Image (cartoon, coloured by chain):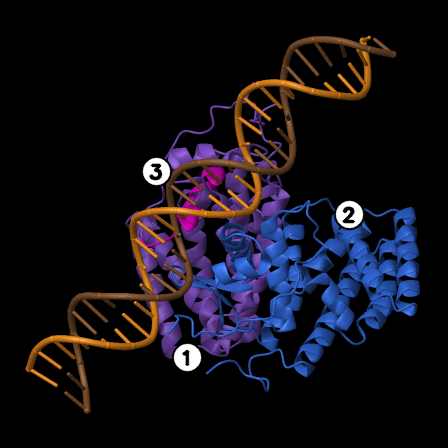
Chain colours: A blue, B purple, C brown, D orange
Amino acid sequence: MTRGGGKPAFEPRRMPDRLDERHQLSERVAAYVREAIMVGDLRAPEFIRTERLADQLGVSATPVREALMILHSEGVVRWEPRRGFRVQSITARDVEDLFEVQAFIAGELAARAAQLLSAEDVARLRATHAELERAHAAGDTDRTERLNHEIHRTINRAGGTGRLTTLLNLTVQYVPRHYYGRVDGWAHASAHDHEDVFAALEAGDADAARAAMTAHAKHIGRLLVEHLHRVHAFDGDTEQSVS
Amino acid sequence: MTRGGGKPAFEPRRMPDRLDERHQLSERVAAYVREAIMVGDLRAPEFIRTERLADQLGVSATPVREALMILHSEGVVRWEPRRGFRVQSITARDVEDLFEVQAFIAGELAARAAQLLSAEDVARLRATHAELERAHAAGDTDRTERLNHEIHRTINRAGGTGRLTTLLNLTVQYVPRHYYGRVDGWAHASAHDHEDVFAALEAGDADAARAAMTAHAKHIGRLLVEHLHRVHAFDGDTEQSVS
DNA sequence: TGCGAACGGATTCTATAGAATCCTCAGGGT
DNA sequence: ACCCTGAGGATTCTATAGAATCCGTTCGCA
């Protein structure tokens, strides 16, 4: 019998085109795997066979391995040397923790931004946010997500890009950006929370900005956890894995 | 003329034997690069040429590339696709930030540990700590560092291993474990701070444990920043890079 | 029947080669 | 003097092959 247990694996889906061909294969594969895990095509504690995945994606084993290395250091998969990479199981507590840290870092960055952003900067943020609301009303989740990302990016990059940004990205990347389109109430919550952040930024009130951003992140975290429960994405939920 | 500017690079030093041959080359190379950066053999914003490094270490380019991928996602080096990997510059603010996050996470884990560790567990911790003090008195920094690591490990793993632990490791790994031996006052500070942590854990007081551990991490962070300033490891300090 | 050792297939891991890309520099035109 | 263009070399990036390792199974033996 074959070594891993011979599961038919998951149905091949095409590589993400958000990351088009000017990006490296490693990054595209990593994005693909991240999404496959979040969607449920890959479940813990299943092994990810490099060659099989390489065949499915039409690439060689090397970039697949590189992608899994990255994912390993992000905690998405676990690398067991000379045995392979297996998707890391995730609990509701893990997601909460992830957003707890995210809230902490994003809060700190927002506090710094409050002392650095000009009135015009905040005005631009508000304009982007208005677009976001229009996109959401029009049901364009893709555009909604992109605008949301842009808002947070400007705030986070206000205080220069450093280790905090890197760490924040690590916690954020875990859930693919466009996945939020599936989360009920996400756009609504963002629309509501952002205003508090903008007001604090405008007033130059660092503590208020920190508080508002922290609350926002935790809010989104709660919504995501509820959603994942509904989809049975967690370990204990209904559909348990193999054995 | 050669592309990177043709610096003679850094003098070859042997691979870390802390990670012996049962580990993968990728990990060993990563550890090597981490240390080379911390020690100053590699400085921002210098490129790390994969083949050159591979030759120096006597391995091929593939594991080197894998190592740099990992280091990239940790924020130690920056990957510029189709151009190469360059060591990320680091400011004093970055180190402070790193330890701020580390303090937050370690504090949370300590708080959880306070509710989970038994009296015997804490007794064992105290025993290990006593060994640590003896090792330090004997001037055995290697053993001191190892015992210190063991103490923190038991505390962090008390609440089961999850995403928080992964994130904590990311912030911790930035500075190689045995580097602390060079930091003046490190062992002394640890000896002092640990007692507060133990007392809180023994009392099962989560908040006190969080506070003690947070203070400890920030304390170490301060010491490290001072040390790095003395060694001129930061960007603005005396010895600036190339141009 | 129960247990240990060796075999065989599968997979990871490292090395190496070739294609694609980027940078530098020289040369010619405006 | 300035810009554009193209050649050449160096380096990254992907693919592929071979060595090392692991797992499941079977065979031999008590």
Quadrant of residue B104 within the rendered picture: bottom right
Residue toward you, A188 or B125? A188
Disc 1 is attached to a residue of which chain? Answer: B
Q: Residue at x 52, y 52 (%)?
A: A60
The residue that label 3 is drawn on is B14
- Mark 1 and mark 2 in contact (Cβ < 8 Å)? no
Mark 1 or 3 closer to N-term?
3
Q: Nearer the viewer, mark 3 or mark 2?
A: 3
The residue that label 2 is drawn on is A158
Q: Using the image, tell me which numbered label, if any, was put on residue B118.
A: 1
Give the vertical position of B181 relative to A37 (above or below).
Answer: above
Q: What's drawn in magenta, residue-wise?
A: B22-39
At label 2, the amino acid type is Ala
Whether residue A214 is visible, yes or no, is: no
Q: In which quarter of the image is the C terminus of chain B?
A: top right
x, y percent for residue C30: 87, 12
Let me know if residue B158 is in the magenta part. Answer: no
- Image-based side of B33 in relation to A235, left or right: left
Give the vertical position of C29 relative to B92 (above or below).
Answer: above
Disc 3 is attached to a residue of which chain? Answer: B
